[in-house]
Image (cartoon, rainbow, N blue to C red):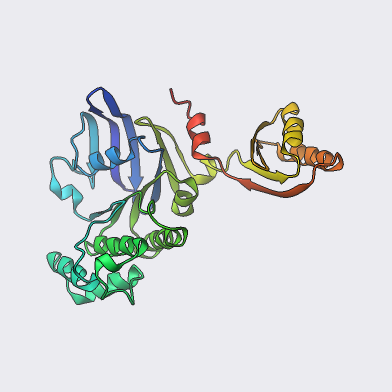
Amino acid sequence: MEALLRVSNVTKKFGLVRALNGVSLDVFEGEVVGLLGPNGAGKTTLIKVSLGLMRRDSGSVLLNGLDPYVDPEARVGVSVIFERPFLPDSLSVKDLLFHVARMYGGGFDDVRKVIKLAGLEGHEWKTFSALSAGLKQRAAIAHALLANPRFIVADEPTSNLDPVERLRVLELIARLNRDEGITFLVSSHVIPEVTRVSSRLIVMSRGRVIASGSPSDLIYKNPVARIRCSDPEKLAHMLKTSGFNVRIEGYNVLVEVGKGGYEVLLELLTTASRDGVFLMNIDFIGATLEELLSAGDVT
């Protein structure tokens, strides 16, 4: 499998702050890679360095086999989607896309294709300023598609959207990967969103990569049981005395199940129910971003 992006031991400092500290990662053709981390983890700096938009202090970056900081040809076939798209407010979506298509030697057929791919049919004559935040992001994706990219980098593409539009943008990314074969690097600080579309996750904190792997390996390897009950304090005490890591959130008790912990947990819940704790709901969720960062042993 070909590495479209290869970052090797890259560092970047801003004064005394080390924004990137020996970062190494690969993005292979056909993947959707989720880049996870809290604000300030170094995700945006890494993206800028990876695209050659910012000089690194040390290490190497190869994009399409070339150094993007010294060779603009490295960015051929690469498009970028930013957190807040900035496109001309006064032009209609169709006119804007047509002007962009002409820059790439295309025409109205290309515009019609990307409008359909991005789900903008029925909105193409609206000006960019008249679009909702979700439609603006989909217009930005249509804009990116006109370059006929094989690799799209999306920096927090859903952060300013409502839940419905977030889902639509994520479904669009998944569809473009599946149907068009486009590789994606998607940065986010929201685990449920990025795991929805990613085949592989890379977790960053304080300028370092602290974990990488499939969503099942990182998020669901050690699931958490969320138990809604009538007496969280009593249930939490029972579980703690049996060796479980527990925390209380309102009427919910969150329990780190761990390997082989299901049967013990269920036995304890049966006992708690007999002792008067009314169990309203039990579901199993993946690790939170905080838990991933804690597991990475960041110092």
Left or right: 168 with respect to 3? right
Left or right: 242 with respect to 56? right
Q: Position of residue 296 (x, y in %)?
A: 48, 29
At x 36%, y 62%, the residue is 134
Q: Position of residue 240 (x, y in %)?
A: 72, 29
Q: Is 122 placed above or below 228 here?
A: below
Q: Position of residue 190 (x, y in %)?
A: 45, 46
Q: Is 116 placed above or below 83 here?
A: below
- Judging depth in this view, the residue of 255 and 258 nearest the camera is 255
- Judging depth in this view, the residue of 161 and 152 nearest the camera is 161
- Judging depth in this view, the residue of 277 and 113 nearest the camera is 277
At x 30%, y 71%, the residue is 115
Is the C terminus in the top left, top right, bottom left or bottom right quadrant?
A: top left
Q: Position of residue 231 (x, y in %)?
A: 75, 40
At x 38%, y 65%, the residue is 179
Left or right: 176 with respect to 264? left
